[in-house]
Image (cartoon, rainbow, N blue to C red):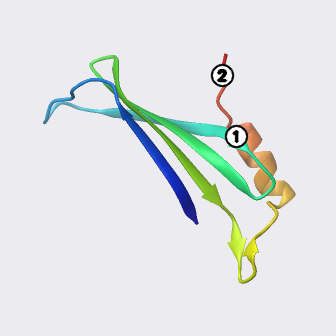
Amino acid sequence: LIVSVAIEYIAEAHFPAHVDVTCGILRVGGSSWQIASAAFQGGECKATCITTIVLTDAEGPATLPQDLREEFERLSVKTT
């Protein structure tokens, strides 16, 4: 379940120039995780996005399985 999307537009991008988007896992919680994305055009960052997702079942938020948590850790981005 996507619970939050925060987009920051940093600079203007132009069509039809190519846009590269990179993504990684920013944070992992007990039942949720955040995906960090950035869009680049001509080597410049044009926008960033943080998406928060919660794993749910019929009763609400569900604990992340260990194998999924390990994969998210492998895909995590380094922050300073």
Q: How many marks?
A: 2
Residue 30 as seen in the image, left or right of residue 6: right
67 to 48, vertically: above or below: below
Task: List the residue tagged with mark 1.
Answer: 27
Task: List the residue tagged with mark 2.
Answer: 79
73 to 44, vertically: above or below: below
* Residue pictured at 82% horizontal, 63% vertical: 63
Identify the amino acid type marked 2.
Answer: Thr
Residue 42 as seen in the image, left or right of residue 72: left
What percent of the width, then of the height, locates residue 50?
52, 41
Circle 1: element type = strand
Task: Give the quarter of the image for residue 66.
Answer: bottom right
What percent of the width, then of the height, locates residue 11?
27, 23
Q: Give the residue at the far right of this rendering.
A: 66
Residue 55 as seen in the image, left or right of residue 13: right
- Residue closer to the observer: 44 or 12: 12
Circle 2: element type = loop
Identify the amino acid type marked 1.
Answer: Arg
* Residue pictured at 67% horizontal, 24% vertical: 78
What percent of the width, then of the height, locates residue 9?
32, 32
Label located before the other in sequence (1 or 2): 1
Task: Give the quarter of the image for residue 13.
Answer: top left
How packed mark 2 is, by other alpha carbons closer than 10 Å (few <14, some 14-19, many 20 or more), is: few
What percent of the width, then of the height, locates residue 73?
76, 40
